Amino acid sequence: PSLKYKILSHGLHLSRNQNKNILTMAPNSTMTDDQPICVSDSFHFASFWTDSSANLAGMDRGSSSGDDDSISGAGVVINTRNGAGRRSRNPSFGSDVDSLAPMNEQPVLKPFTVANPDRVKLKFYSNVLGDNSTFIHYGKWDGLDTDQPGAYGRASEAMTDYMYKLSMGLLPHRAESNDFNYVDLGSGTGASAIHLAAKHSLTVSSATCINVCHEQNVNAIERAAELNVSDKINVVDASFDETPCPSNHYDLAFSQDAYIHAVSKEKAFAEAYRVTKPGGAFVFCDLVCGNDPDLTVQELAQFAERNRINDWLNPNQIVKTCNEVGWADVTFVDLSTDLRISFQLMLKKVTFVLEHGDTGTSSSRVLLMNYRDSICRRITQIERGVFKWGVCHARKPVCMDMAVKPPVPFVKTNHLIIDTHEEDETRKVESEKNVVVIDILKKMNKDTIDALPSTVELLITMSAGLDHIDLNACKAKGIIVKNSGRDALTSHVVQYCLSFFIIG
């Protein structure tokens, strides 16, 4: 039977349209018989086709599109089915001017449809991007020989290791734990999570893979079983900007080369913030808009439209958006040099296949030739700064509610501690209380404790005793109780007694 694909902003959903045997569906999504039959990520060269009678018409149009990518020019599919009232940042193309509009009034860019019966792009993903491995990410090339067989796959793996090491540097108190729990948002084949779960089995206890492609998810589950890490890998069919994950649950929100597909970066970053524990970290790598002063807004806008990018932000805007949804210590690390090497090796591989390999049908050869030309343009665009690639990392603050006035001025020992009474005006989201501080005069009975927000995890009392707190109610609500005055008061009593002893 022919297949039909459900187009989403960053993935696909698959069904068999003859017997309606739905393999997977996205939350709040529908599928009708008149929807396009292709899902495509033109920037990463990942598209899937199902019509064996397709011709080269789409590719012919794409190949004559000037500076455009090889798969452009086949027509635009506009999405207005996401529902009224949902809001998204307008594509800003490196501009510092942002605006919000209802989704049903703002077109969402969707991939172009291109005919290719041999599914060459699936092979491109596996053979060129991953060296026949399950890694399909751009690589980190420090110390790697690009001429060695399998270099691209090892570089992709090295990038995952680089990001994990960076994450542990942000969370040193969790680096030696045995219950580290993280979520991979837009996990693709699940290769990164499976690799980290196997390599750091004593530390990583659980990795949740969020991905919209059911076919990739099935493969991830099978691969995890082969490496005996199924007990650590949880694969979920969902979108990274609307997950079923509980709030304040993960030590780390992690993502590789996925957010370029986001309709709204703000929504995607906010969802990562929601599921991360207070004090946790957010680490992701992605392609971003260039911010070179020699680039024009028109050029950046044209690039984004041609590559179907909805929310094309530059590094400064990425940092700003992360801050607005609540993240702190946001830093962008430019790794565009590594990206250039990745594209150079892709060009070398495609050229070799064209000159020495079996390219299959004539349509496959034409598509590979278009890939080669497009990769050449990519390298030039990297050198000109039209787009960049890098890692962004951030921390989630701990929000504290001083329910009583402290006896002495409170001095924050860590900048990640936020007093809810001193809100930052640049934050678009209201802080959720994680810690409540009281004294012995503040009675915390069951009703008072039950009325606390569900996000409160710690209750600190500035006293030696706990008689004013209903400990059973705290336990039932999952709140840890600590007192900050016990050690200090005990120390003072000992000194007082010793002074009497010495003076006589």
Image (cartoon, helix red, strand yellow):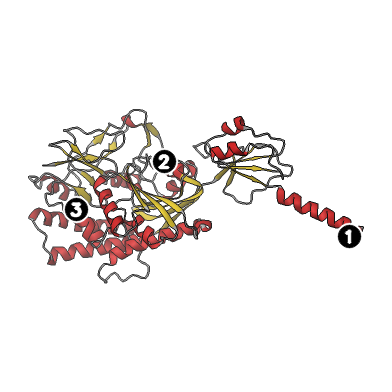
Q: Is residue 24 above or below residue 171?
A: above
- Residue 208 as seen in the image, left or right of residue 172: left
Percent position (x, y) of residue 174?
A: 50, 56
Residue type at numbered disc 3: Lys
Quarter of the figure with residue 270: top left
Quarter of the figure with residue 20: top left
Q: Is residue 420 above or below residue 133?
A: above
Q: Is residue 167 above or below residue 311?
A: below
Percent position (x, y) of residue 501?
A: 88, 58
Percent position (x, y) of residue 59?
A: 14, 48
- Residue 93 as seen in the image, left or right of residue 344: right
Quarter of the figure with residue 467: top right
328 or 24, which is in the foreground? Answer: 24
Residue type at numbered disc 1: Ile
Of badges 2 and 1, nearer the viewer stands: 1
Percent position (x, y) of residue 231?
A: 36, 53
- Mark 2 lies on a secondary structure that is helix
How many marks do you count on the picture? 3
Residue 266's mark? 2
Q: Residue furthest right?
A: 504
Give me the C-alpha separation between circle 1 and circle 3. Answer: 85 Å
Q: Quadrant of the N terminus?
A: top left
The residue identified by callout 1 is: 502
Residue 121's mark? 3
